[in-house]
Amino acid sequence: MTIDKNVLITGATSGIGAALFALFSKHGHTLYPCGRNEEKLRELKEHSTRCQPLSFDINEIEQVNLAASQVDAIDILILNAGDCAYIDDAMAFDAANFARIINTNLTSLGNVLAAFLPKMNKGGQVVFVSSAATLLPFPKAEAYGASKAGINYLANSLRIDLEKYQIGVSLVHPGFVETPLTNRNTFDMPFILSASEAAQRIYKGVMKKKQYIHFPRRLTWLLKVLAFMPQFLRHRLM
Ligand SMILES: NC(=O)c1ccc[n+]([C@@H]2O[C@H](COP(=O)([O-])OP(=O)(O)OC[C@H]3O[C@@H](n4cnc5c(N)ncnc54)[C@H](OP(=O)(O)O)[C@@H]3O)[C@@H](O)[C@H]2O)c1
């Protein structure tokens, strides 16, 4: 039997977040799906009676605070919203692009945590969607990888500080998942999963309050083994 939880998901209007929304709804939880796409949020509301969409840009602190004022209590806070852009030419380093990705993927989490952590119930779980890309440095991923590596530290550090409030932290490292974000990629994406497969793995891990959720394991273990290689060998391989 599943006990009904209040679940807030950022980035619920697309990809992994939308698949998580569908899965948590199917299991009878009360949902707060978030995003900027109001049309998509309206569609989500039509599919579930136990759903209160919240429209806000995670970079805009006033919008985040206004959304938080409409929420009473949260059991599961899933910080999934994010974006990806590559640094195509390292010598013509695109500072604006770098800042945009770091702000959306990492700095904005400060806004969301400040607004929503005080709403968390004891026994709750904060879930950070990082990336398996942080297991190894990849070319052109300076902005995306740095933002997600920052999330790793944030999540692992916050876990220690939230323990006394009886709030757990899960860090998620997905490999490649088929979504509008990866549809833009022109390179091979080994072991790619569908968004609903990814959501199932995240759901299972979150409900078990796992501190670390990574998938598909054949990719994440491979990356972990490669990370043990001497630096010069790894460099050549990449
Ligand atoms: N797909 C993969 O292979 C993969 C692998 C590892 C990790 N991830 C991570 O998984 C998360 C979800 O990715 P996805 O692949 O599902 O991407 P996606 O389909 O592009 O969805 C991204 C979501 O983030 C929201 N978002 C983006 N910028 C926002 C902003 N400024 N304010 C509010 N919401 C914003 C979007 O909502 P609106 O447009 O409605 O604002 C959308 O719902 C990301 O953090 C990504 O880095 C993905």
Image: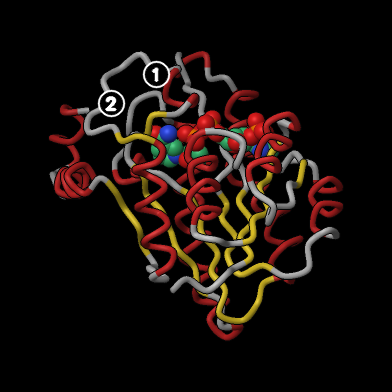
On screen, residue 86 above or below 136: above
Say whether marks 2 and 1 touch (CB < 8 Å).
Answer: yes
| Residue 114 % position (x, y) | 73, 62
Q: Secondary structure at mark 2?
A: loop
Quadrant in which residue 131 is drawn: top left
Which disc number belongs to residue 189?
A: 2
Residue at (39% x, 67% y) in the render: 211
Can the viewer see residue 209?
yes
* Coloration of the structure image: secondary structure
Residue at (61% x, 81% y) in the render: 122
Amino acid tagged 1: Asn
Q: Quadrant of the C terminus?
A: top left
| Residue beneath disc 1 | 185
Can the viewer see residue 145?
no
| CB of mark 2 near ligand 1 (< 8 Å) | yes
| Residue 113 % position (x, y) | 68, 60
Q: Farthest residue in the bottom direction?
A: 164
| Residue 59 % position (x, y) | 73, 41
Alpha-carbon neighbours of circle 2 within 10 Å: few (<14), some, or many (≥20)? few
User: Closest to the observer: 196 or 202?
Assistant: 196
On screen, residue 108 above or below 75: above
